[in-house]
Amino acid sequence: MAEKRSALVLGDAKYQSVRELKNTVADATAMKDALRALGFDVTLEIDKDLRRTRRALEDFRQDAAGSDVALVYFAGHGAEIDGDNRLLPTDTDVSSLDSLKASTLPLNEVRDTVTSIAKVGLVILDACRDDPFGAGDGSGRSAVAIAKRVAGSVKPGLGRVGRAENVLFAFSAAPGETAADGDGEHSPFNAALTKYLGTEGLEIRSVLTLVQQEVYDQTRGKQLPYIENGLPQLFFAEKSDTPLPERERLLLAMADITPDLRTEIETIAAGHDMPLAPLYGAAIESGLAQAARADQVAQLGQAADAFVKTRNDLKTLASDDPDVVRQRAEAENKLTLGEFDAARAAFGKAIGIDAASRDKLKANFIERTLSQVASLSLRAGGSLVSLKYQLAIEDYRAASVLFDDLTDTALSDGGLRNKMMVQFYLGQTLATVGNAKDALTAYQHAVQTGESRVRRDPRNLSGQREWSAALVRLANSLRDSGQADKAYDAYNSSLVVMQRLVGADPHNAQWENDLGASLHGIALLETDRGNLAEAERLHQQAAQVSRALIALEPNSPIHRRELAVAQMSLGDLVGSVGNSQAALPAYQDGLKTLEEAVALAPPNTFNQDLVVMHLRVGLTLLHLRRNQEAAAEFQQGEEIARQDIENDPNNDDFARAYAAATSQLAAAQLATGDVLGAVATYRRAVAFIGPNARDKKGEWLKLAAIGNGGLGDACAAVRDVKCAYDAYHDALEEQTALVHSDPRNVFAQMALALYHKKLGDAGDNRRVHYQAALDILLQLKAVGALPPAYQSWIDLTRQAVQSAR
């Protein structure tokens, strides 16, 4: 602080020939106060014409001579004229190019002034970035109504300096971009500059980084200040023994985000109509800069959804306690700024207030309980914005436990809804982290609460829709855990509700979407049970629902993705009865629809779906003996899946897609005669699938059985009997576990019969395995569940039994 610091602050507002500015005087005054607090000797000049501006510069040169630091700040209009950056004083003459040049101040004169005073100079320009010759919209510091005949000689905004020796230039926006004048008392640039200029512990360049990112955040990415630094040394550093506050740490970290991730954040934030800081905070805290692009999109989408939900909940979850309201408002403000720890702390204070009052004021027990639940839920939502799932689970669990002290009859409809949503989001968050068992329990509780709510008021349409959504989530969890019968009941209950709601309002896109989800879930279960005609009817209905949704919201990639799923499911149906010729166009239609969805969505959003669709097309081509085309489809699918699994090896969905693609590629190699290549690829697939199949059920067991069955076929083709026997034996064990988990799954039983026959063919207890296969097929025929195309299996298997005697 022993050094001499001098500053000249200029603010021009009352222009004679161009648009006046409303904030520049207040900006200049605020800058004067901020600089004086830092030990500057400040001269403030307001609304000066060119002559008096030059006089102010000359006086500054004389008065500040010998200073260690010289600073000039200008708030007003500016433009680049014939390649020269110029500041516009109040008497700027816009009648001609010559008069414009003669009545404006070259930026070089400002630079020459500060360099003549001190070895360290700063020039800070909060000037225009809008076209001075166009009709500015009034949002930027632009000069307007200038003669059109000089337009060709002027560029929007101030250009790069190029030579910044011993001077740091700070521009309020990048060259050619708009610098907002601001809706409040100060411009965004000035507000950030005066806020952070005296930050302790930071050198000036870090301070200006804070300013850059603050302006960028507050303007939703529309304005990013630009710095040209030619300083030979550090200065302006205020020492501090305390760490920087959370907001400052976030802003500095934002500067290191890659351009691609910055673009992704801007796109997702704009789509959710939310500020940038929460997404930047989520990206930084979770290390998304190093993640795969698809993972970035998915997790940023989750964070954005959580922010929107929490913002909406803050409006609907009211409290009668002014202290709780005040703490929640503080939490909302901190969450908007990306200060997650501070937001969580504010929510914690609100929770504490409710907890204390709940214990002391028994008369308000229910109200205080609900208020505490609301604060816990809001804090959980804030944790989800920063992708801190375990913290969210802890708060949702705590909120759920509080409801144990209240009976459903004691709760209003709003209280019951809050209870159901706590249980629902607890289940959703548990499912996100892979805790399927506890997620299932949470969804069961949500369905029970939703049913209580609907019984109380059957006319509550929103209550019915929310209950239906919980039923679908429960059904999905039940299906994934192998409880097909219970899943069917849950899907069917949801379907009944949604058919009634859609009938009442066929133009409600959300209700149509829920209806499609119920139809799709039941159709998959009917397919597994062998009820193919019913499954086809349901898939056709689901496809029609998706087409209706596309008509309602044509730019939604999700609706096209759902249509593609329905088309794929129809292909699965006709393919399951051996009609590959009819299945191929259905799959190709699905692939085309999915590619339309990809064109509307962020990059890599539907990678897993693309893998699955390529596999379906490839497998059908394989059945049609178009082996080379099939191999090309499998290779495309495996390449997409390989990139995903390399970028995120812990992602279960990516892993399953990769495993399926690898197995199908091996099948194509086998079909084209590359038997040794098929053996190697199958071994690679089985080695990858094995550890997952030992720990998980459902899809992993199915993939393991397919992989081992294919490996057995490939080994048999090269006459490696032991390899074939071992592989078929493993496939049989895995398929048996699948049948036990879902006894009504016809195709699982048919696959079990197949593996029994293959083991018999391999010479292991031939008669026992052939007889087991025959018994399964006869049982399926007896109940009418064996597809006609497979009737010949019975005769072939019976012959095998007889030959083994």
Image (cartoon, grey):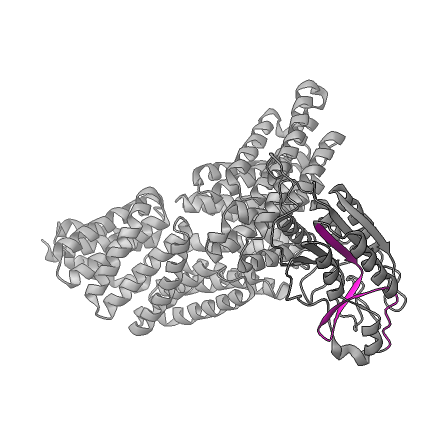
Point 42% across, 68% down: residue: 587
Establish if 17 lies above or below 311: below
- Does 375 sit left or right of 705 as displayed? right
**Which quadrant of the structure image shows residue 515?**
bottom right
Q: Position of residue 329 (x, y in %)?
A: 71, 38
Establish if 89 lies above or below 285: below
**Which quadrant of the structure image shows residue 760?**
bottom left
Residue 322 visible, this orientation? yes
Q: Position of residue 496 (x, y in %)?
A: 56, 49
Point 23% across, 66% down: residue: 670
Which residue is more in the foreground, 13 or 268?
13
Residue 452 visible, this orientation? no
Q: Position of residue 228 (x, y in %)?
A: 64, 60
**Magenta span contains residue 75:** yes
Q: What is the span of residues highlighted in magenta in the rendered image? A: 69-95
- Does 553 sit left or right of 586 as displayed? right
Point 69% across, 55% down: residue: 121
